[in-house]
Image: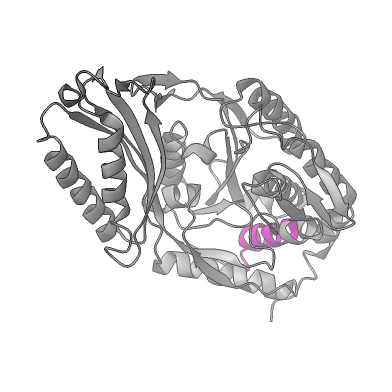
């Protein structure tokens, strides 16, 4: 029966740093790093680099990302600059290679009113990105520190990617995720768990789409019949895509925004419909793609209109595989030894774990803190989970390195 005896000193060292873990989470939450706030992202990136360099990685890289193609309110495609990713690698020749991933962007832009972290009580911090995912970055850092102080470290190599664009679908860092998946054996992603500690199991895939509708402008009074109202057609298309929800069991479609129009006496000639689609299986993804193609073909027959579709499925569904089940069992065993059993729950949310799974890398993608109300000004992290989750990852890494448990 395995015990914690050999690993306990390194787990205790994490617990002894609890106040430092809380301090880092608070300090990083106070840095606005909205996905498009380049100055804030640069500040957060420097803070991360300063701390991860204590791990003495063999290589440290700042990686420029290809600009995102963004459809503006007029339907024109514009380049959107992204922040830089950070990549650290150590012991690339070790027999087991582990990929650790977390994002440092948040959904809260520079002009969002939610900017400052606040302690709600002795165990709860309310703050932007506190759970998603800055607390998770602290957990990752401290788990690696424990591994690096242990006598088993030489048997395991690791690669860390900290990306600045996960909250917008990882458009620039997707190639970096694919490359890491090709050279590592397992992945550890630091998205937040639920408040009760439940981890994400299977995840739906996600796609963001933008339909650009172009019609014909006309005077709304004198020549109304000569116009082709792009806003009206965009609204019709919104209803049509919405009807795809539940066309198959796991499909949901969320028309989120229609932009267009202008003076009330002008028939609007441009509109942009933006919507998100979630699917549970590859079959559902293919079905949606075919239905959208059919919808556009029919709409294109409308005289005086043209329609362009931008975007697509950036994150395929993450479904159960035997190797993923094996990795889950190892995490469960480590959690049991720590006296913190874990459970799993399927979710409609998605993350970089979807990307890694699509490229064949088994991964656990909710190894971050316990928290909740993410993507809202009520976002919180339960502070006792910082030590708890850092110990879980550290124990997994040390046991793998020591050869007590195996994955390959």
Task: Where is residue 117? Give x, y as percent.
Answer: 80, 41
* Location of the N terminus (image quadrant): bottom right
Prevailing secondary structure of the magenta residues:
helix
Q: Position of residue 339 (x, y in %)?
A: 75, 75
In terms of image quadrants, where is residue 91?
top right
Identify the image quadrant of residue 104: top right
- Of 170 and 223, nearer the camera is 223
Number of marks drawn: 0
- Give the image location of residue 322, x and y in percent: 40, 69
Asked whether, in this view, residue 84 is left or right of residue 266, the answer is right
Decide whether residue 236 is among the magenta residues.
Answer: no
Vertical relation: 371 (above or below) 50: below
The magenta span reads: 390-404
Specify whether 149 is left or right of 304.
Answer: right
Residue 17 visible at all = no
As rendered, which of 267 and 106 lies closer to the eye?
A: 267
- In the rendered structure, does residue 393 fall within the stretch colored magenta? yes
């Amino acid at each position: 029966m395995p015990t914690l005896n050999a690993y306990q000193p390194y787990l205790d060292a994490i617990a002894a740093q609890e106040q430092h873990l809380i301090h880092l989470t608070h300090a990083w939450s106070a840095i606005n790093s909205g996905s498009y706030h380049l100055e804030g992202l640069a500040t957060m990136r420097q803070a991360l680099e300063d701390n991860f360099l204590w791990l003495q990685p063999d290589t440290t890289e700042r990686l420029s990302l290809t600009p995102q193609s963004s459809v503006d309110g007029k339907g024109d495609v514009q380049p959107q600059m992204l922040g830089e990713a950070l990549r650290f690698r150590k012991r690339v020749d070790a027999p087991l290679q582990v990929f650790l991933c977390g994002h440092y962007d948040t959904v809260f832009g520079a002009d969002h009113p939610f900017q400052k972290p606040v302690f709600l009580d002795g165990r709860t911090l309310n703050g932007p990105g506190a759970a998603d995912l800055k607390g998770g970055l602290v957990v990752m850092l401290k788990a690696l520190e424990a591994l690096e102080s242990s006598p088993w470290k030489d048997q395991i190599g690791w690669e860390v990617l900290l990306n600045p664009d996960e909250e917008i679908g990882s458009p620039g860092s997707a190639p970096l995720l694919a490359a890491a998946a090709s050279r590592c054996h397992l992945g550890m992603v630091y998205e937040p768990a639920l408040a009760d500690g439940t981890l994400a199991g299977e995840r739906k895939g996600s796609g963001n789409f933008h339909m650009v509708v172009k019609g014909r402008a006309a005077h709304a009074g004198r020549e109304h019949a000569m116009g082709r109202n792009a806003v009206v057609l965009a609204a019709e298309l919104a209803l049509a895509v919405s009807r795809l929800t539940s066309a198959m069991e796991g499909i949901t479609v969320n028309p989120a925004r229609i932009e267009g129009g202008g003076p009330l006496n002008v028939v609007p000639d441009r509109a942009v419909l933006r919507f998100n689609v979630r699917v549970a299986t590859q079959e559902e993804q293919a079905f949606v793609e075919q239905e959208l193609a059919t919808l556009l073909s029919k709409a294109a027959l409308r005289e005086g209109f043209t329609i362009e579709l931008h975007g697509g499925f950036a994150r395929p569904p993450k479904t159960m595989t035997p190797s993923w089940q094996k990795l889950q069992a190892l995490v469960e065993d480590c959690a049991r030894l720590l006296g913190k059993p874990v459970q799993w729950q399927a979710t409609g949310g998605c993350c970089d774990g979807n990307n890694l799974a699509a490229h064949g890398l088994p991964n656990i993608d909710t190894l971050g803190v316990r928290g909740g109300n993410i993507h809202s000004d009520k976002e919180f992290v339960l502070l006792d989970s910082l030590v708890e989750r850092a110990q879980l990852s550290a124990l997994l890494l040390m046991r793998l390195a020591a050869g007590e448990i195996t994955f390959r």
